[in-house]
Amino acid sequence: MEHQQAYRAAGAGKHRAYRTAEAPARNRRLLIAAAVLLAATAVSSESKAQSGPFAPMAGSWSGAGTVSLEDGSTERIRCRAKYAPIGPTMELTLTCASDAYKLAFAANVQSAGRAISGSWSEASRNISGTLQGRGSGGNFELVASAAGFNANIALKTSGNKQTVNIHADSQFRGANISMSR
């Protein structure tokens, strides 16, 4: 049997020993080609996600701030945000909590030039509405509206730092949050 394999390999112009020595080199070339292809795909996907008006916000952020309530009290809060931009659209979540307060905000927005529009929801209070505003480059002035609720939201992004300021006309008076990546 061993003799027949050697004979077939020789008949094909390659000796069995040569074929075994060539396999690691061929595997290395395939592995390098696959790595280059994977890197090119990752760069292409990243550039798609990183273009558009929301690109400077992409990724996960965390930080702290304060929340102001209708009775005048303020509480320190810890916050996490995740921004997932794809071209002129973005999904975002902002979750903040203290011992007595929780905010679970989610939104889907889109840009048409400097005009921003979309929808939002706040899970802990079961409220949702629309977002309207202006901005680009990670800096936005928005108004979140729902029945009986309006809030002005300012997002300012500079490198790996971001501030979120919310001012409302309800039981929740506002929040000032500083985050970083």
Image (cartoon, grey):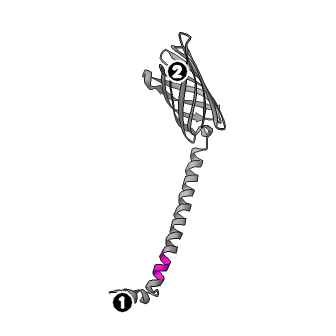
Picture quadrant of residue 136: top right
> Which percent across, then down, holds residue 165?
61, 23
Crowding around mark 1 (Cα neighbors within 10 Å: few <14, some 14 to 19, many 20+) is few
> Which percent across, then down, holds residue 90?
54, 37
Residue 173 against residue 12 in the figure, above or below: above
Residue 138 visible within the image? no
For mark 1, give the secondary structure: helix
Reading the image, the residue beneath label 1 is: 3
Name the chief secondary structure element in magenta.
Answer: helix
At x 39%, y 90%, the residue is: 7
At x 55%, y 13%, the residue is: 73
The part of the chain drawn in magenta is 18-23
Q: Nearer the viewer, residue 77 or 54?
A: 77
Reading the image, the residue beneath label 2 is: 145
> Which percent across, then down, holds residue 102?
48, 23
Q: Amino acid at mark 2?
A: Ser
Q: Residue furthest left?
A: 1
For mark 2, give the secondary structure: strand
Residue 56 against residue 173 in the figure, above or below: below
The answer to if 20 sits in the magenta stretch is yes
Residue 121 visible within the image? yes
Q: Residue furthest top?
A: 71
Q: Amino acid at mark 1?
A: His
> Which percent across, then down, holds residue 179?
60, 31
Q: CA distance from mark 1 to mark 2?
A: 82 Å
Q: Nearer the viewer, residue 117 or 23?
A: 23
Quadrant where the C terminus is found in the figure: top right
